[in-house]
Amino acid sequence: MLVKRSPNATGKGSGNASARASTARSGLAGALADSLEPGVSRRAFLRRSGIAAGGIAAVGALPGAMIRKAEAGPILPNVELVTRKNVCTHCSVGCTVIAEVQNGVWVGQEPGWESPINQGTHCAKGASVRELTKGTRRVKYPLKLVDGVWQRIGWDRAIEEIGDRLLEIRKASGPDAVFWLGSAKFSNEGAYLYRKLAAFWGTNNVDHQARICHSTTVAGVANTWGYGAMTNSYNDIQNSKALVIVGGNPAEAHPVSMQHMLRGKEHNRAPFIVIDPRFTRTAAHATEYVRIRPGTDIPIAWGLLWHIFENGWEDKEYIRQRVYGMDEIRAEVKKWTPEEVERVTGVPGTQLRRVAEVLAKNKPSTVIWCMGVTQHTVGTANVRALSILQLALGNIGVAGGGANIYRGHCNVQGATDFGLDVTTLPAYYGLAEGAWKHFARVWDVEYDYLKSRFASKDLMEAKGIPTTRWFDAVLAKPGEIDQPSPLRAMMCFGHGGNTVTRMPEMLKGLEKLSLLVVADPHPTTFAAIRERRNGTYILPACTQFETDGSRTCSNRSMQWGERVVEPIFESKDDYTIIYLLARKLGFADEMFKHITVEETRPVPEDILREMNRGCLSIGATGQSPERLKMHMKHQADFDKITMRASAGPCAGDYYGLPWPSWGHPELKHPGSAVLYDTSKHVMDGGGVFRARFGVERNGVSLLADGSYSKGSEIEDGYPEFTMAVLRKLGWDTDLTPEEMRVIRAIGGSDAEMDNVSWQTDLSMGIIRVALKHGCVPHGNAKARAVAWNLPDPVPVHREPIYSPRPDLVKAFPAIEDRRDFRLVQLARSLQFKVADSDLRQRFPMVLTSGRLVEYEGGGEETRSNPWLAELQQSMFAEINSKDAERLGIEDGAWIWVYGPEDGGKAKVKALVTDRVGSGTVFMPFHFSGVWQGESLRGNYPPDTDPIVLGEPVNGVTTYGYDPVTFMQETKVTLCRVEPA
């Protein structure tokens, strides 16, 4: 079967209404014809459930006035109604979705009333998720692009052809020539399995969305106090006496979280402070709004600390006991006087003093941040500066305090935890030989077998190519890439194509790929790129509502979602697709040695049990499938603020067993609601800062000084637990004979047993004994205000590459150019070139980007949902009223936004508003399907084009990467706006 692209698919402008209206009429007619089929069949159920309006999936082609509202359908009488619990597939809050199912069809939906997280509420996106299983714009069967024509093929042929091509590329260019792009939409089990697939293939070129949202958060907080995750929870914000939100807009990005924030504000009369370049919907709730120049977060943090130190408002005893290196911070902070902060950020010193005093005198206070902090060339340093601010105030490890980091996608925390990262194996073990040997034991394969899968031992232990730079790795010339071959193929599971900056360059890389495989419920932006005419496959992957498994919320709680309906059309779940690929590539027997495979579908419960056995380093060991299912069943028993069950079979547990949940599931560790909380016993969820950087530096102890968790038998700091430490303490006699046998087997000999640590002891005996004596297995150290292993051990302000203030560039330069992640990173040389040019005159405005309440991520899924599409039908740019008047631009008019690189431009509608300051332009990042004024609707496979199309903001964004993680700069670049 050949499905041809329309010859006139690409029309000028974002309009081309007549051609699109024709497409819409055809789609509507088809949908109506389908709806006439009689009988109580699956199709009839869909029709009666409201899917007769399925033709609305084509209404992106119709004028706005012709779009009618999406409508829910009735539940059929006298037919058994089954309810199933799953978790919303959008943001990271983790809202429970209760699905009502009849005859295998999802016919009704309720929010989880008993859930301690959403408590009977949904946002617009959550309320619309039932549509995902209706399939109006879904990929229905495997597709292959041949000479620009989409050809329907079967699964067997698709896997056979893809596998053959992968093996050819591997033979010719090595395993590193393939890039494995995973997804924050995976379940935990899917993410783990995908990382395992990449390991057995023989590459560390495996990544996912966290690279472009919170990789700098993970690096920043992990390098400060030990773990790369939110310290508290959304619920715990109700205990806060002051809230500071920096670079985040939860009212749109995480709407359900706002109920917890507003309760904290109202119940505690807590000051609610928003620091952001844009007056957001969240700022509308603020008691104080601070408008800053984009890219000046560190001067703001240091400006706050300047007032705190000047007035003696810091927690001196907390710093003495639990923080290393604060004196070096004081020296840097002294430079940031109120006058200097105002010169660089635009924030008056009097306002910043007021905010600092509020923070210091209303404790515990919490600091919340999102991608406005992380997506910068200094993202890691930004994160560390805010973390240090909280350390100075003694706000880490206390209820109501914390660093509350709002992650983006529904499982971006879990996918990061379980290894979809070019720098590490699952659970942040890293890539050193010891990490590989640990997972060789977990997977029950020989270390030498794993090593043989890689091009070399060096590459086995080297960071891979990140998703922000994959196209640079495709286009790289000899000498520009530190691996044997450029990338030649990309396997893309559940990831948008419009999410990377510098899209004009991305398109060149996409065109050059020999093989592109997209596995997704929707075709994604990749499918609509006209530059590719061959070598592209689309595999219909189902949603998380059509499979089962666990996902991790921002607060580290894991929730089990049960399958609502079977995969629709010919789609398959991620587990099955990964297995089929592994089987074709020749290593399924080794990879699934201890995982049950039913026909071709690995059992997710078995995958989680393997994860429990091996992911000791983050305490992802106590969250068995049985315990997680029990929590979902008994949600009503959990307190709505503490998230702890006071009765029932889960009594004593924190909801979702937020990691670390130490030891075997049988130990029944309750999870850790607040990380680093010394007020509780470790078996009650208490903790201390992790000792992962040694015990001293330059003669100064790195261990805690007189601070320890409640009930600890060691009433001081201590190193991480190893067999040697147990022997020194005389606690090795607490180990059972079986635990000793396993430890001895890992060590290899009695002499080497001492090196076995709590992270590598698969018996978990070392962990059990540490807990028995009230100690935390990872040791008890000070948090690091100074991180000597980072490019900037003390965070310093550096102007963006495309700075709107060239007068500041020489005083606050970017880092030196360097090589990392197998590629060249330009920084200072490019920044100076920009500053010394006339770009500032030709591109006089600052461009920043962010989220909308209606859509999520790259937007392909949400813009294909009729309930959401009717709410936001156009891509737009916010422009200040003064700028609009000066440029002769009216609200709602078409404008061009031009970027300074590679001819970047976008045609969008103007939204004239004073939400943005003069000189700043804001654009949402959820749109694609229009490129530089031309519609790409006809390039999608028929009936899969999203309802709403628009220009991607990343067609205008520019070069710039964080040196620690290669996070891309999306929040500050230059642009020019003109009437269209």
Image (tube, helix red, strand yellow):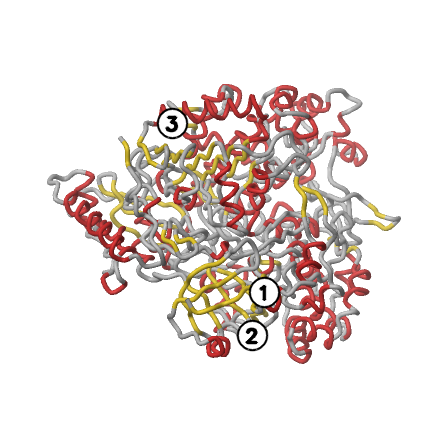
Q: Secondary structure at mark 1?
A: strand
Picture quadrant of residue 68 = bottom left
Q: Nearer the viewer, mark 3 or mark 2?
A: 3
Q: Is residue 29 visible?
A: yes
- Is tag 3's residue or tag 2's residue first in the polypeptide sequence? 3
Instruction: Look at the image and tell me in which quarter the N terminus lies.
Output: top left
Total marks shown come to 3
Q: Which mark is residue 246?
A: 1
Q: Amino acid at mark 3?
A: Ala
- Is tag 2's residue or tag 1's residue first in the polypeptide sequence? 1
Q: Is residue 333 left or right of residue 390?
A: right
Q: Amino acid at mark 1?
A: Val
**Residue 176 at what x, y percent from top left?**
59, 30
Q: Amino acid at mark 2?
A: Tyr
Of 375 and 479, nearer the camera is 479
Picture quadrant of residue 404 = bottom right
Instruction: Look at the image and tell me in which quarter the C terminus lies.
Output: bottom left
Q: Which mark is residue 289?
A: 2
- Residue at 62%, 59% (x, y): give it: 402
Residue named by callout 3: 158
